């Protein structure tokens, strides 16, 4: 049915890992050998109960091409951080080597939940773009929401997305990749 989400890849962290890759072909964490491709115009990633091994770290992610993470300084983003403990914080960054998502920690209920929509990922003549919507408990236990978007400012086909922490490993969490049926 048009407009339906079709799950195409998933991975659950059951013991600490350095990173999780959804899609990316044979380089994907699930071993399912699936890729982001032209079968869907829009993809969606759902993250649930993601927590780090190390306290007070940030969740990062980047695109993959041929299963290899793109580490060039070609990631731009803008977002609004909505905090329970202080004023809203508009943020923007250019020419980073990753998309920087949210800070979290190892304390009770400090975890990350979010959705990323992926656009133009398989189109080699367009920039890949993202929309982010998330909620987390930061390393001080404060509720933080983020909404925003970003561009990978390289015209290249991307076949996956890799998640990792700014320091240390991912301790837990479930990661799912969906295609939006045409």
Image (cartoon, rainbow, N blue to C red):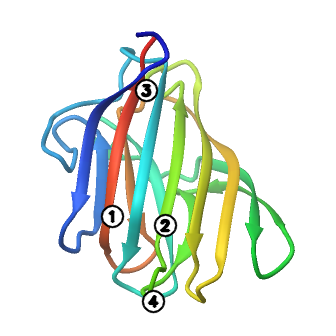
Can you tell which of label 3 and label 2 is closer to the viewer?
Answer: 2
Give how far apart the Cα atoms at labels 3 and 4 are.
38 Å
Mark 2: which secondary structure? Answer: strand
Q: Is residue 88 above or below residue 39?
A: below
Mark 4: which secondary structure? Answer: loop
Which mark is drawn over residue 107? 4
Residue drawn at point x = 31 percent, y = 44 percent: 22
Left or right side of 124 for 30: left
| Mark 1, other Cα within 10 Å: few <14 / some 14–19 / many ≥20 | many
Q: Earlier in the sequence, mark 1 or mark 3?
A: 3
Q: What residue did someone put label 2 on?
A: 112
Give how far apart the Cα atoms at labels 2 and 1 are.
8 Å
Residue drawn at point x = 77 percent, y = 82 percent: 85
Give how far apart the Cα atoms at labels 2 and 4 are.
12 Å
Cβ atoms at labels 2 and 1 below 8 Å apart: yes
Can you tell which of label 3 and label 4 is closer to the viewer?
Answer: 4
Q: What residue did someone put label 3 on?
A: 157
Give how far apart the Cα atoms at labels 1 and 4 are.
15 Å
Q: Earlier in the sequence, mark 3 or mark 4?
A: 4
Find residue 168 and report its horizontal and vertical position in percent: 35, 80
Find residue 159 and report its horizontal and vertical position in percent: 35, 32
Q: Earlier in the sequence, mark 2 or mark 1?
A: 2
Residue drawn at point x = 20 percent, y = 50 percent: 29
Q: Earlier in the sequence, mark 1 or mark 4?
A: 4
Mark 3: which secondary structure? Answer: loop
Can you tell which of label 1 and label 3 is closer to the viewer?
Answer: 1
């Amino acid at each position: 049915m048009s407009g339906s989400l079709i799950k195409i890849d998933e991975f659950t962290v059951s013991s600490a890992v350095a990173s999780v890759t959804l899609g990316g072909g044979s380089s994907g964490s699930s071993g399912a050998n699936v890729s982001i491709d032209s079968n869907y115009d829009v993809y969606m990633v759902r993250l649930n109960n993601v927590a780090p091994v190390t306290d007070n770290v940030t969740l990062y992610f980047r695109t993959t091409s041929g299963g290899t993470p793109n580490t060039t300084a070609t990631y731009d983003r803008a977002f609004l951080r909505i905090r329970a403990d202080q004023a809203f914080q508009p943020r923007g960054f250019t020419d980073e080597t990753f998309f920087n998502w949210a800070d979290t920690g190892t304390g009770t209920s400090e975890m990350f939940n979010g959705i990323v929509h992926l656009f133009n990922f398989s189109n080699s003549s367009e920039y890949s773009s993202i929309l982010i919507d998330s909620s987390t408990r930061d390393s001080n236990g404060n509720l933080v929401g983020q909404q925003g978007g970003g561009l990978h400012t390289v015209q290249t086909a991307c076949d996956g997305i890799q998640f990792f922490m700014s320091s240390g490993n991912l301790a837990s969490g479930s990661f799912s990749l969906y295609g939006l049926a045409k």
